[in-house]
Amino acid sequence: MAETLDGRRVLVIGGAKFLGEAVARAAADRGARVVIGARDDDRAARLAAELPDATSVHLDLTDEEGIRAAAEKLGAVDHIVITASAHHNVPVAELERDGIAGAFEAKVVGPMLVAKHFAASMPETGSILLFSGSAAWNPAPGLTVMGVSNGAVSFLASHLAKELAPLRVNAISPGVTDSGTWDGLDAASRGAMYEQAAESSLAGRVGAPQDVADAAIWLLTAPYVSGETVHVDGGARHA
Ligand SMILES: NC(=O)c1ccc[n+]([C@@H]2O[C@H](COP(=O)([O-])OP(=O)(O)OC[C@H]3O[C@@H](n4cnc5c(N)ncnc54)[C@H](OP(=O)(O)O)[C@@H]3O)[C@@H](O)[C@H]2O)c1
């Protein structure tokens, strides 16, 4: 039977905007006491003020001492969702060490440290939800760092699930999703990218934040699912 989020404490790291915000809003709609974890304190506090019974905490996944301090300040949380990412999408010949390290810090190293500092005080019914991405399963020039770091997230979910059981650990792998993260592109480039992504999916469209938030809520409340990566990509891996 699905577990409830009503009254549960759900920390969303990267929760101040985009898919993190969508997950935070969806969890709050189901009665969760949401904690927005983000580097942007003002934006996190503004969102928390909009949601019932929500708070915010400063969290930068590149800062272990900050992660430890946040864990001490918050005490027990039921669920943790981590949507953070840092992009370094360049051809192999242009890779920079700091860019590679930054991508892995946001997606892999930081989440490992979150598990280190938070897991021991989480209840057995709790869970951690990581974010991978479809680039892991679709090698493409310029996307090596994104693809490999997202692939590592999927393995991280499996390994953490084994070591931290019965705490559950899962990952979502979104396809191209109109979350706001692409709004920095000019309209023509974004439109072309969305069109190509829609044609390369079985759903015939790009993802919406609600598609991902719905999957996130299911994974947080599905007591018999652990170590899995759920692909929310409109069937793109099969197209
Ligand atoms: N949207 C898509 O098309 C798509 C496709 C495949 C996979 N995904 C994955 O889905 C997840 C969410 O994506 P998104 O669309 O919401 O956009 P995004 O641009 O990847 O969002 C990144 C979020 O992570 C935060 N962040 C970055 N570095 C951080 C750090 N060191 N510590 C704490 N927070 C940090 C950012 O906050 P700041 O304001 O502090 O930078 C932002 O809130 C990501 O993991 C992404 O890779 C998304």
Image (cartoon, grey):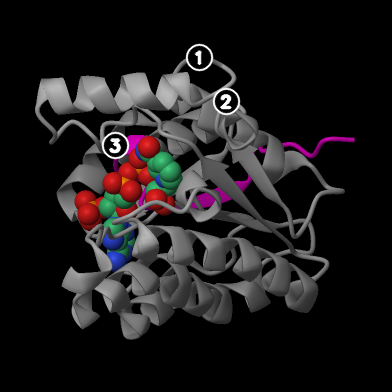
Residue 83 position, x and y percent, is 43, 51
Report the side of 91 relative to 32 (left or right): left
Instruction: Name the mark on residue 47.
Output: 3
Instruction: Name the mark on residue 204.
Output: 1
Few, some or many residues within 10 Å of mark 3 (<14, 14–19, 20+): many
Look at label 2 and name its amino acid.
Gly
Report the side of 44 relative to 223 (left or right): left
Q: Is residue 66 magenta?
A: no
Residue holding disc 2: 234
Cα–Cα span, label 3 and label 1: 32 Å
> What residue is shown at x 54% (from left), y 34% (from top)?
27
Q: Earlier in the sequence, mark 2 or mark 1?
A: 1
Can residue 6 be seen here? The reply is no
> What residue is shown at x 49% (from left), y 23% (from top)?
210
Circle 3/circle 2 CB separation < 8 Å: no
> What residue is shown at x 52% (from left), y 80% (from top)?
117
Q: Does dot 1 land on a helix, a strand or a loop?
A: loop
Look at label 3 and name its amino acid.
Leu
Residue 47 position, x and y percent, is 29, 37
Cα–Cα span, label 3 and label 2: 29 Å
